[in-house]
């Protein structure tokens, strides 16, 4: 069985037709959903970008143990396991974080790697600039030299084909054209789009707005609504600017969707649907001004945490269904890894925290998990079930450590021992500081799906029940002892 993994960064499910959107044009994602299974309760695990990718590529949830970083020597990367199972493994991506010092090890296990350069803050072009356009200068109001760096990378773009998702998906289509004859292949296709900067050419720039927008930043600063950083942005931003930025995100999504269609066309052209599974998902969503927030930082509301997942598997061709299929079970990003391995005929037991989704796809069961936890290292933990979402607070001064085999900078207080359950080698234990505290929150998912009303003060019984679920899942996943204390649980 072949497999194609399609990862579209910062993809919001609320902007997709298969999840009810009627504004943004995504005909190829809609077309894929007609064939695939759509998952309605799929959630992030570790955020943001590289923590999410470690989960997807290794099946190990990391946010209770460490934050952004490279693959560990004890990880078993999906590309390596795919190759052991006889697949030719290739990655095509414009995700520039892969070639940064603190995010290495993710690409080396593929047979082939195609890198598209220049997105966001990529260290690519350095020509002196005598002037920059208004839209790039607007980025620098809140992003400093980031606007100039990005503009230097894209200043010579002239047509749609020069932009990042068209290049990435075109290269993936070209790889498939040349390599679909292999007995077994694994193609990881990864677009950093629809990530910011939300910079797109025509016709997408004006597809969802009549505003000119030259004076607006298409790369707004991140917000969390609690600590007041970048507060001046919200004190001065106009509704027109908010609308314009959202329209540019929509345009970028429509452009990405168009070029995704080229890849899907290759599956049609070479009759690959009968022997190729296809997964389309994201690492996290992206808030676009809702709740006065930009980005994907804690607390993780469903806006960024409840993410799209659609899977095609050839076994579905024999299923009798008149409507697109949907799965209501709770699933987690870490479940993608063992699913990929099972599809490719590799050893799915290598997943530390993930559970294969194939029983759901084969309709052998309708349940998967009774709760999922997710978050960002150094902050709290969010736990979700079918009824409630609970965001824990934490002790800002409580002990917290990074556990890793890598020490990029000297750490005089670090100690080394076998700290990680199931890992039979020593790692560094490095004391760090927690993030600034965010209040405890509880939302009723049934009566308040938009998560507008925190009911933690009024429903202490449910808070207690959700905390018990949180602790149980932490126990199951082998959380470090100090995490319990900083989250207000008794020491273990």
Image: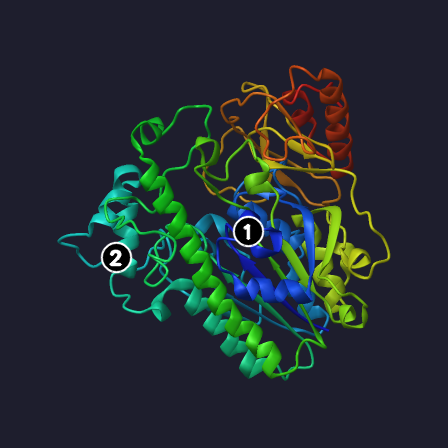
Q: How many marks?
A: 2
Residue drawn at the location 31% of the way across and 52% of the way down: 210
Q: Residues within 10 Å of mark 1 (few under 14, many from 20)?
A: few
From the image, tell me which residue sits under label 1.
21
- Residue 411 point in image, percent of width and height: 49, 33
Mark 1 vs mark 2: in front: 1
Q: Position of residue 304 (x, y in %)?
A: 55, 42
Where 115 falls versus 349 (above or below)? Answer: below
Name the colouring of the figure.
rainbow
Q: Looking at this view, name the residue that lies furthest to the left.
A: 130
Q: Quadrant of the C terminus?
A: top right
Considering only order in the chain, which callout, 2 or 1, is on the residue closer to the N terminus? 1
Which numbered dot is residue 151? none
Depth check: 240 or 483 in front? 240
> Which quarter of the figure has residue 35?
bottom right
Q: Picture coordinates of residue 489 (x, y %)?
A: 71, 20
- Residue bearing the label numbered 2: 152
Q: Quadrant of residue 347?
A: bottom right
- SS for tag 1? loop
- Give the vertical position of 161 relative to 402 (above or below): below
Nearest the viewer among 57 and 455 is: 455
- Where the N terminus falls, by quadrant? bottom right
Give residue 193's position: percent from left, percent from top: 45, 56
- The CA distance from mark 1 to mark 2 is 35 Å
Image: 72 above or below 77: above
Secondary structure of residue under mark 2: helix
Q: Nearer the viewer, residue 296 or 77?
A: 296
């Amino acid at each position: 069985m072949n497999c194609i993994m399609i990862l579209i960064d910062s993809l919001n499910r609320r902007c997709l037709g298969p999840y009810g959107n009627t504004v943004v044009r995504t005909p190829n994602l809609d077309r894929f959903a007609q064939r695939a299974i759509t998952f309605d309760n799929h959630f992030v695990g570790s955020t943001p970008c590289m923590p999410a990718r470690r989960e997807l590529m290794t099946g190990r949830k990391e946010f209770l143990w460490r934050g952004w970083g490279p693959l560990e020597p004890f990880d078993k990367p999906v590309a390596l396991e795919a190759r052991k199972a006889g697949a030719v493994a290739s990655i095509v991506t414009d995700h520039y974080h892969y070639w940064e010092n603190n995010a290495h090890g993710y690409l080396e296990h593929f047979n082939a790697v195609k890198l598209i350069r220049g997105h966001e803050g990529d260290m690519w072009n350095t020509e002196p600039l005598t002037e920059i356009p208004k839209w790039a200068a607007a980025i620098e109001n809140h992003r400093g030299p980031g606007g100039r760096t990005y503009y230097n990378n894209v200043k010579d773009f002239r047509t749609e084909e020069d932009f990042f998702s068209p290049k990435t998906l075109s290269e993936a289509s070209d790889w498939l054209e040349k390599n679909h004859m292999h007995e077994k292949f694994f193609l990881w296709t990864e677009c950093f789009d629809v990530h910011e900067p939300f910079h797109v050419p025509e016709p997408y720039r004006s597809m969802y707005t009549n505003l000119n927008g030259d004076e607006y930043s298409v790369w707004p600063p991140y917000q969390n609504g609690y600590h007041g950083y970048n507060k001046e942005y919200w004190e001065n931003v106009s509704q027109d600017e908010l609308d314009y930025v959202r329209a540019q995100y929509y345009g970028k999504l429509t452009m990405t969707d168009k070029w995704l269609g080229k890849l899907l066309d290759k599956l049609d052209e070479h009759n690959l649907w009968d022997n190729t599974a296809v997964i389309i998902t994201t690492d996290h969503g992206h808030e676009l001004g809702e709740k006065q927030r930009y980005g994907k930082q804690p607390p993780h509301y469903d806006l960024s945490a409840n993410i799209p997942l659609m899977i095609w598997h050839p076994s579905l061709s024999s299923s009798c269904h008149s409507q697109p299929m949907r799965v209501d079970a709770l699933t987690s990003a870490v479940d993608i890894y063992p699913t990929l391995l099972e599809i490719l005929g590799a050893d799915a037991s290598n997943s530390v925290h993930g559970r294969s989704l194939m029983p759901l796809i084969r309709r052998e069961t309708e349940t998967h998990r009774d709760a999922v936890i997710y978050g960002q290292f150094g902050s709290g933990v969010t736990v979700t079930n079918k009824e409630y979402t609970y965001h824990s607070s934490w002790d800002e001064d409580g002990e917290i450590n990074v556990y890793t085999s890598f020490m990029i900078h000297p750490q005089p207080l670090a100690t080394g021992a076998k700290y990680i359950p199931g890992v039979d080698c020593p790692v560094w234990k490095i004391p760090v500081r927690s993030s600034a505290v965010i209040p405890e929150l509880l939302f009723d998912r049934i009566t308040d799906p938009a998560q507008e009303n925190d009911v933690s003060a009024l429903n202490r019984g449910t808070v207690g029940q959700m905390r018990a679920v949180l602790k149980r899942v932490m126990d199951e996943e082998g959380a470090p002892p100090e995490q319990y204390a900083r989250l207000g649980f008794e020491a273990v």
